[in-house]
Image (spheres, rainbow, N blue to C red):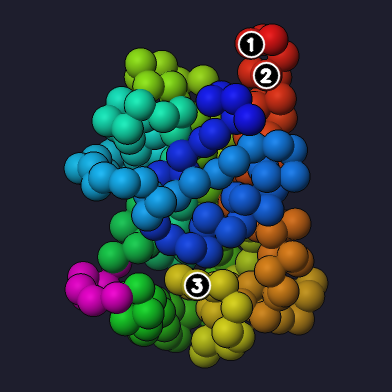
């Protein structure tokens, strides 16, 4: 395996790592997470106001500090009735510290409170993902994106996935994102869409580098 086939995914989230690996590893790419590195590196401050901007910050920052080609994503939930909130603040919207499960529970509770009283017809929402691939010299090689549409439901349902998955209801399927199997979700989700588009960009780059 060549060095260009080894990609650092700038996350320690095992769910994100699994989703991206399922798309890229069958194509011959080795995807490693931050937890697999022998050293720790400073986390770039995500202070941009767009998903695209934060994905670039992470990809370039980690690529430069680790010396590895780095793929980063920034993703979150956009709720139309809340003027796009929680948006780029999705991961820590409730301001609660603790492990991922505690933060997810607090974020979901805040969302349910925020949409209380809003009719279902106005609860359109979507997960957004933006991905950026950068080289150690800081150059951006590719950017992709994806979206996963649904509506916010009244109570969390399902145990698969993470974050706001239990609250994004998919009318055509009659279930939430958290009730989809991992394979079903990855074939249709915002991150799966962005990762498949990135796979096409990586194949293009392989052709340019050969």
Q: Which residues are magenta?
A: 93-99
Give the number of the disc on residue 190.
none
Question: On the image, which quarter does residue 2 sit in?
Answer: top right
Which secondary structure class fits the magenta region best?
loop
Give the number of the disc on residue 209.
1
Q: Residue at point 40% right, 44% down? A: 10
49 relative to 181, above or below: above
Give the number of the disc on residue 162.
3
Q: Residue at point 29% right, 66% down? A: 93
Q: Is residue 60 magenta?
A: no
Q: Residue at point 63% right, 11% down? A: 209
Earlier sequence position, callout 3 versus callout 2: 3
The image position of residue 107, as x and y in percent, is 35, 75
Q: Residue at point 41% right, 29% down? A: 68
The image position of residue 90, as x and y in percent, is 37, 62
| Residues packed near mark 1 inside 10 Å, few (<14), some (14 to 19) or many (20 plus) | few
Q: Is residue 94 magenta?
A: yes
Relative horizontal placement of residue 71, taking residue 42 as reference (left or right): right
Whole-Å distance between the Cαs marked 2 and 1? Answer: 5 Å
Q: Which residue is mark 2?
A: 206
Q: Secondary structure at mark 1?
A: helix
């Amino acid at each position: 395996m060549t060095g260009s086939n080894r990609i650092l995914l700038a996350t320690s989230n095992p769910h994100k790592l699994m989703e991206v690996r399922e798309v890229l590893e069958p194509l011959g790419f080795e995807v490693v997470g931050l937890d697999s590195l022998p050293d720790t590196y400073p986390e770039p401050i995500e202070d941009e106001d767009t998903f695209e901007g934060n994905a670039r910050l992470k990809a370039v920052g980690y690529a430069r500090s680790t010396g590895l080609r780095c793929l980063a994503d920034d993703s979150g939930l956009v709720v139309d009735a809340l003027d796009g909130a929680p948006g780029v603040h999705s991961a820590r919207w409730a301001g609660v510290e603790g492990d991922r499960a505690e933060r997810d529970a607090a974020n979901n509770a805040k969302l349910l409170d925020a949409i209380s009283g809003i009719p279902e017809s106005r609860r359109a929402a979507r997960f957004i993902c933006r991905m950026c691939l950068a080289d150690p010299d800081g150059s951006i090689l590719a950017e992709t994106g994806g979206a996963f549409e649904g509506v916010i439901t009244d109570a969390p349902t399902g145990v698969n996935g993470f974050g706001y998955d239990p609250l994004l209801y998919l009318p055509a399927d009659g279930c939430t994102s958290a009730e989809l199997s991992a394979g079903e979700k990855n074939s249709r989700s915002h991150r799966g869409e962005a990762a498949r588009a990135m796979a096409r960009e990586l194949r293009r780059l392989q052709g340019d580098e050969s």
